[in-house]
Image (spheres, rainbow, N blue to C red):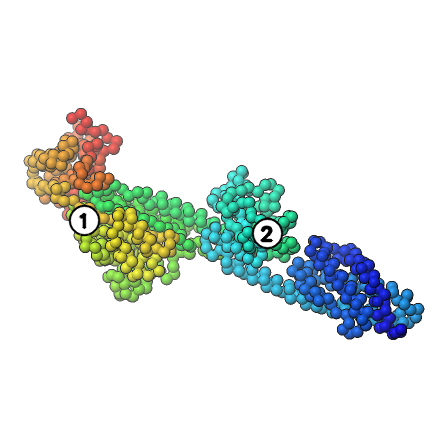
Amino acid sequence: MDGTADGLVSRAARALAPRADELITDVTQCLRAEVPELWEDPELAGMTSENIAEHVVGVLGGLEAGPGPRSLEPPPAHVDRARRLARRGVPVTVMLRAHRLGEGVILDGLLAELPRLTDDPGLVDAVARRLLALSTRYVDRIGEQGVLAFQEERDRRLQWRTSLVNEAGLRVGTALDIARTTQELADLAAEDFADLVTVDLLDSVVRGHAPRAAERFLLRRVAQGTYAPGGGPEPAVKVQELHSCPDGSPAARALATGRPARHTAADRATLVVPLTARGTTLGVARFSRHRDPAGFDDEDLLLAQEIAARAAVAVDNACRYTHARATALTLQRSLLPRRTAEQSAAEVACRYLPAGGRAGVGGDWYDVIPLSGARVALVVGDVVGHGIHAAATMGRLRTAVRTLADIDLPPDELLTHLDDVVIRLSAEAAADPDPDPDPDPGPGPDPDPGPDPDLDPGSRHARGPGLGLGPGPGLGPGLGPGPGLGPEPGAAPAGDIGATCLYAVYDAVAGRCSLARAGHVPPTVVHRDGTAGLLDLPPGPPLGLGGLPFEAVETDLPEGSLLALYTDGLLEGHDHDVEAGLAALREVLVRPATSLETACDTVLQALLPTDRPHDDVALLLARPRTLGTDRVAVWDLEPDPAAVAPARAGVARQLTAWDLEDLAFAAELVVSELVTNAIRYGSPPVRLRLILPRTPDRPGDGPARAVLCEVSDAGGAVPHLRRARTFDEGGRGLLLVAQLAARWGTRHARLGKTVWAELTGTGAPGFPDLTAGL
């Protein structure tokens, strides 16, 4: 029998080996009492029990074989279990304490065997010292291995968490869209963090209104992501479905307190994290695991909170942008014509598309304004910038254009007055800053990036090649060093407001169109022979510069041709290449189309890659109608009161020829009054003209129920409607005209004026029909 200390150690281990189960039980009881963290859930408890058994058996087997420097080796699974403890969030101190306590119990069992094996106190003391040294060396060794594996796993998890948070910053919030932003959050978390992710927003947040009491916990499911579709229980609520969370539920508590919650059910573990941004709770995100029974630890909860916090800011940005865009779009739609006004001079079709993405609603507009004398004004304009302010400015300019059009200003004069309006608006904007600026959206995409720094401050046209506002080549003559679509402005507007505009007046009697533009892209004309090209117009400065002239051009527009007016967003939608956009526009316009409405749709589909263009787009197509000589009668009158009677007789004969005898009485009275005023107060030559317009809603040359009476002279005196006193001899003629005519007015020409009246046989609205019963 070996009487050495190592021999006695081996004998003690051999004697204790049959009672290894008892020793394992003793170690387990010790750790349950001293280290309860290792027994908190079944998986962790099972792993701890396996670790205890392998360590006890391994230590006894190593000592029995003969104690030596390499006799006590850690179990093969020791390092893997250390990593698993790190993944579970167990502190490294807990692991080290468990090792020391376990080895202490084993050491006590071995020392208890020594008195039964020898009565030599010196040998027992030597064996005790030997066992203590071996135990210390073993605990140190497994501790070093465990700490190293533990730290490696912790570093790996820290890098993974940091990477996941950084990825959330890159992948969540790439677009200012609520559904897309929340789905990005759900997809990201479902890839590496959870098996099922759902995102619910308060319905009041989605709709952009204050929640009512009954809607306190009314949620809308906006996104859902799964690790493996079909691999786990499906959520009961579908995407875009409304649902309520009961009082006291984890979601309700998270919404009410703004604090996250963690709970475990029979089939899954769930984190409920509120989405809070700028002090407002927007909704909740749920992260569930059903494949991993371990569930979520405290670090998982912190990670979910950080991801949710970043996503909440992006969601809040998307909500703010969506609501601001909806408001601006509503304002824009309310300021644009709901339907084009009835007129007989041209067939028209119009479209407006707001910008998509970050740009938002802008200030593009169109208008169709009926004018006297079978004429129509066609307008397209573009206000610099995007958002509510641009839309509001657009509305003010559109109102100004309609007001100026009502007094029948020529296109160049109208743009001059409109330029003054923009200058005044710019001065007001500079002197009175916005008292209620948009709230700071915080981190994330800017919902309104404002004008591109590469664009000219007075126009949205680029200064580089193509649009001709700079020295590069362009599409038409300009005021700068090189040809282009617009001038080199030379100065910025007085404030933050700038705009471009194209104003055209088409005369159906003459078949001619007078146009002028202020920094706007020129229109495209499709001729009767099927060819298309840009209309050569002097560019004119953008509105708001002041001090530079505008020039009008007249051109023939025979029936069968097509005039296209548009904003630059239509051209830039073709891969941002204006030249390519113009070529594509010409190609589309020359194609046969069943109607102008169809032609509008075809143009938008061909030139815009999606239904959400980079810039807002206004498009107006007009097909002119001409009036032949059979619909126009003209009399040149002598400046003599005796000419009134022949004029009345000629009008009566012409109305009979047009099958409009029911309008003869009113027409004779109106013509008599207008011709008399022109002869008495005007200057020769005096001309009378009757126009039979086409009825807009009646195709072909069918009978019309209206006639236009015009009397022109070279004088500058303008008649005014006034109330005649009882004993006044004059002053009642224009009142009679106003009662008989549906509309009447005066327009100025380069020399003289024209007083006109539109007769429909029913009189003016609100006035009695003086022809009744006659």
Identity of the amino acid at label 1? Answer: Glu
Proximity of marks 1 and 2: CB atoms separated by less than 8 Å: no
Q: Which residue is mark 2?
A: 288
Where disc 2 sits, the SS reads strand
| Quadrant of the rendered image containing residue 656 | top left
Q: Which residue is mark 1?
A: 559
Identity of the amino acid at label 2? Answer: Ser
**Residue 560 position within the rendered picture, expressed as x and y whole percent measured from the top left:** 20, 50
Residue located 87% across and 65% down the image? 113
Q: Is residue 654 left or right of residue 163?
A: left
**Residue 611 position within the rendered picture, expressed as x and y whole percent measured from the top left:** 37, 52
Residue located 89% across and 73% down the image? 1
- 473, above or below 413, in the image: below
Q: Is residue 535 visible?
A: no
Where disc 1 sits, the SS reads loop
**Residue 180 position within the rendered picture, expressed as x and y whole percent measured from the top left:** 47, 53
Q: Is residue 643 left or right of residue 369?
A: left
| Pointer 1 local density, CA inside 10 Å: few below 14, some 14–19, many at least 20 | some
Q: Is residue 14 visible?
A: yes
Mark 1–mark 2 distance (CA, rounded to whole Å): 69 Å
Q: Residue furthest top?
A: 773
Q: Is residue 430 left or right of residue 319?
A: left
Quadrant where the C terminus lies?
top left
